Each structure stands twice: as C-alpha cells, then as structure tokens.
Image: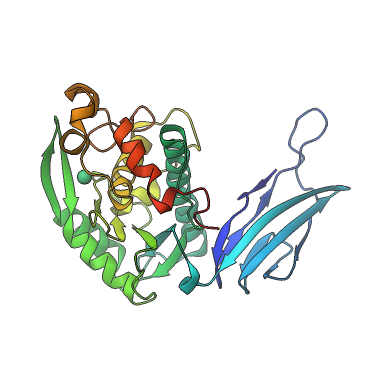
Amino acid sequence: MVTPASPLLLKGQGTQFVATVWDERGAVLPGVSLAWSVAPPVGVVGADGFFTATTAGAGTVTVAADGVVATIPLRVREFSDLEYVVLPVMLVAADRTSVAGVRQGLARFRSVMEHLRGWYQLRAGRTFPFLEPVWLPTTRTAAVWDQISYATDVPEKRGDTTVRERIELLRVAKEEYGQHFPPPGPKLKIVLVPYTGDSPDVWLGALAEFTGGSFLVAPPRATSVNCPPSGALDSRCADAAYAIGHELGHLLGLEHACQAYQDATSQSRCRMSIMESGKPPLAILLPLEVAALTASPFLSPAAGQ
Ligand SMILES: [Zn+2]
C-alpha cells in the first residue's frame, strides 16, 4: 500500500510517499528495499520516496519491492490553472520551521481534511477535491500566532452552543498568505491554519468569508489534531472536524441550517446539521443542504480534474 493515493500537487510542491509491504501472513515487512520512479517526468522522486513536482501534467509514480510493483497516479497543477478545488495552506510560525515539525503538522492537517472529505462524501453523496496541503513560512512567531488566536475570540450563541469566531486571525492569516500567492479568485477555496508546534489548548473555533468567499481560517490547534480517515473520532478531532467542516460548508455556499433550511424539517433535526451544532461523524446534512451542495461546482464529479 502506498500513501498518499492519487495526490494533486502544485508545481514546486513536494510530498512524502510511504510504501508499506506485507508478507503472505499479513505482517509488515520492515527494511524492504524500494525502487521509486516517475513517468512521464512531471517531477523527481528520491530513493526515500520524496516526490517534488516540477512540471504541470499527469504522471504515475511506480514503486517496486521484491518483484511487487505498485503505481500511484498523480497530477501537478500551476497555481493559475487551479479550478474548483480546495487548497489547504499551513502557515508556519517563524520559529517553528524544523523539517520534522512541519511534516508532522502537514500530516495532521491533512488527516482532518481527509476525514472531512469522507464525511461530505457520506452525507452529500459527493465531495470536494483538495490539493496536498502546502506550507508557507510566515513572519510571526508561535507565541504571536497563539496570542492572536486567543485574543480574537468573539463568542456567538448558535443553537444551544457558544462558538467563537476569529476575525483578527483571518485578517492576519490572509495577509501572510498574500506574501506568497495572488488572490485566489472564485474557483479556488483556501483553508488557512497556522502551525505553532505544540499549540495551547484553545477552543477550535474557525471563521470563513461567507457565501461566495474564498478563505477559511482555523486557529493553530487544528494542526496538532490527528484524525483517523473514517469512523469514530475523539473529542479533539471532532472539534477540529466541526470547526473546519462547518466553515467549509459556508465556503461551499451553505447558510446556518435552522435559519435557511428549517421549513423542510423539524427544529430539532436542523440542529444536528454541521451547519448548526452537529459534530462529525454524527452530524447530518438536511435534504435542502445536500441539494445546495450538489449544485456547487466544487462538488462536481469533474471538480479538481
Ligand atoms: Zn457559521
């Protein structure tokens, strides 16, 4: 087995492929020597399985071990050619740029996105594509990011829960993003999460630019949460999946369930929606929410191709 499966990457971006080899009894074989290659040459892959994308196009990475061969399709895109896809961006604190830390943060951020992709597929019957998470260096230190995250809590009552919005965090995160990439345009949705290493135990609130907006921000703790790809979640992962998944719903065109869609269902049921206070994996989508998502080009079967 090789992860990640069929990744979508930006030109210039790298990703670590990991191959696991089992023996005939199902035990993992350690220390197997692997031979990696890529064709056509949309990038280069090292002996350690680290792939760097160099040319836009579609390619296949092949890994061979003891006569067993696995292939992984991948696609490389220019930023200017991205259409109807979600780009997860990890904003790395100026004093948290160690390679090991950044890799772990990216893997954990990816796990939350992967869980949400599966959850939307289950509830809406289709889902959004996302690029492999990108990391960008920032000018702010970990202490500054954590402070911004604390300082901008704006409590808001929603249903029977209090959520906190993060207006200043969104402003600063967009400013750091703008140091590296041009504004995304309507065919790209950006999820911004700062990485500060061992972030303090703050509430996992998040904020999106509403209907038709392009940006979503979650506080640093989301990059220290590790979600399993499916099934049961511990409370930290459920909080992260709710915070990002709810705001992602706004980016994809949804409003708050009990205000916008309550005519179709009972008041108690609308509260179970991720667009009110329902947390994955148990959160639901109401029929009118599914219909709205189905109309979004970001959830088209052809999105991200
Ligand atoms: Zn909301």
Where residue 242 appears, x then y in whole percent? 31, 39
- Tell me where residue 210 sits by quadrant: bottom left
Q: Residue at x 61, y 71 (%)?
A: 56
Q: Nearer the viewer, residue 298 or 249?
A: 298
Q: How many marks?
A: 0
The answer to whether residue 278 of the structure is visible from this angle is: yes
- The C terminus lies in quadrant: bottom right
Residue 145: image quadrant is bottom left
Q: Is residue 305 left or right of residue 120?
A: right
Rendering coords of residue 276 (x, y %):
22, 35
The picture quadrant for ligand 1 comes to: top left
**Would you place residue 302 above or below residue 245 in this image?**
below
What residue is rendered at 89% in x and 48% in y?
67
* In the rendered image, the vertical position of residue 220 relative to residue 121, given as above or below: below
Closer to the camera in the image, 134 or 34? 134
Going by the image, does 157 lie left or right of 232? left
